[in-house]
Amino acid sequence: MDVNEAQLISRCQQGDQEALKEIFNQYHQKVYRIAYGVVRQREEALDIVQEVFIKLFRSIRQFQGKSRFYTYLYRMTMNTAIDHTRKMKKVPSFSMDEEEGFQLSDDAERRPDRILDHKELEARVKWAMDQLSPDQKAVLIFREVEGFSYQEIAEATGSSIGTVMSRLHYGRKKVQELLKDYLEGGR
Amino acid sequence: MKSECSSISKLLEKYFDQEVTPKERSLVEGHLPDCPACRMALDSMQNLRILIKSPVEEAVEKENFPWVWEKIEKGIQRKERLGLWDFLKSWLDGTPLLKRKILIPAVAAAVILILITAPLLFKKTTSYPTLSVVEYVESETYNVMVYELETPQVTVIWLFEGPEEESSTS
Amino acid sequence: MRRKASFFVILILLLSPFFGDVAFAQVQVRVRVMEASNVGSGFDSSLRDLHDQLGSLFSFSSYRLLKDEKVSLSLNQSVLLSIPPERSLELTLINQRRVTAEIRVKITRGGRELLTTLVRLAPGRSVSIGGPKRGEGTIIIALSRVQ
């Protein structure tokens, strides 16, 4: 952690909202990336960003600098995003959203060569990711979206590197299986 | 060849994630040209990464985070106010002031005091009554957000168009 | 009983000036319709007084004035203006208190009501309604009191 960041955190711990704003300016995009990676929906992801920074302001006194600040923040983000998905849990389907009620028909399933609309594919990826356990999803998003190293993922998830590799392996395997039509030249 | 493939395939993910040692890297890279199966496995991992990552990149690129910080500030203030309100409630529940015999004369005395001092207060102050600028908003077409700032004094009613309105806009 | 009643009467009489309506002949409102976008850059000089407000809220690079009108509103009488894109803006003075004027704002399109809002305009405070798209830009309507 550099000196500037340490000072910002210290000010934040003393209730300085301007310090929180500077932290927000620095990290809000990254927090949004993780949130969007989990929920894949703009409004929800923005809600999560707000929630994370409010939570951060209330809990930052507990941050003792034992881990890197960004892994502390990203862990908070991931937990908040996954809590959101639990609250908003829908029956697994290919429907994109409630208003549009779009569903992938059986006919489409039998035609892997069909060129899918961008939104349909997004819905399918979201569905596949939702089939993972929270731990597998977290590891996959930290690796694929954020490009974290195994060490950084271990720190952000509070687990060992071996556990990270195992979750990554089984998470990838499951999602690859669910999306195999699109991964094997079907896109 | 088969046993080599099975031992190399265990390293493929680490290789893909650039977590291999130099020795492991040269083992994998020595094996790949002769193994379509392992190359296909790597392609599949790469395609999966694109599927997971691209929509996120697109979303971040076009996002301008409208009023997110302002909502965070309000959220922090709201939580602080709630904490204070709970404290007041518990204090009021216990206070003997709420007994009828004391309450009515106490309120009457407070009103008279306000009436006497109000003209003096109104003379000095130049601020406008603190009513909300927007009383209500009704729309069946738009999702609406109302945003008010004191400094500078600005109120914005922002309309989010649905697909129907977007397509009919000239 | 008589004492209680006379106490309340005096109380109401003393408090009534603070809640009574003040009748003014007319309220002048300035309506400016602008197109904000990220295509090009520039800030229309007629929008100078809104510069700080707009800048604090939005990150558009260009603000172009499309319409600038001053309207006089009388109590319960509506004034209709056409605004892009293909919409109408109806302003009606509903009430006027000491310094604030309560104005009902309706935006319609082809006779269909898109938005109705009641806003309180005081001198020095503007209300903006924005969001509808027009090509690459976004329409923002700024309403402010004219002294």
Image: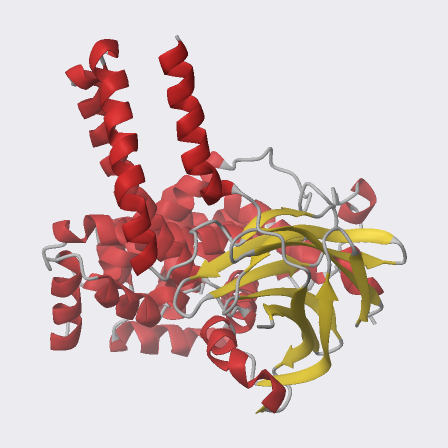
Q: Residue at x 79, y 43 (%)?
A: A105
Query: Could you tell me which residue is drawn at 49 percent across and 71 percent down?
Result: C57
Image quadrant holding the N terminus of chain A, namely bottom left
The quadrant in which residue B17 appears is: bottom left
Tell me which residue sits at (12%, 70%) in the image: A7
Using residue A62 as the reference point, say whether residue C98 is left or right of it. right
In the displayed structure, would residue C9 be above or below residue C105?
above
Camera-nearest residue between B111 and B163: B111
Position of C11 compared to C132: left or right?
left
Residue A66 falls left or right of residue C84: left
Q: Quadrant of residue C67?
A: bottom right
Q: Position of residue A84 (x, y in %)?
A: 44, 42
In the visual, does C109 lie left or right of A74?
right
Quarter the C terminus of chain A occupies:
bottom right
**What is the residue that sits farthest to the right in this orientation?**
C110
Q: Give above or below for A104 relative to A119.
A: above
Rendering coords of residue C10 (x, y %): 41, 28
Q: Position of residue C77 (x, y in %)?
A: 78, 55
Residue B142: where, in percent of width, then height? 70, 53
Q: Nearer the viewer, residue A55 or A136?
A: A55
Q: Nearer the viewer, residue A84 or C48?
A: C48
**Observer-nearest residue: B49 or B23?**
B49
- For the question of whether residue A168 can be seen, the reply is no
Residue at position x 45%, y 74% in the image: C56
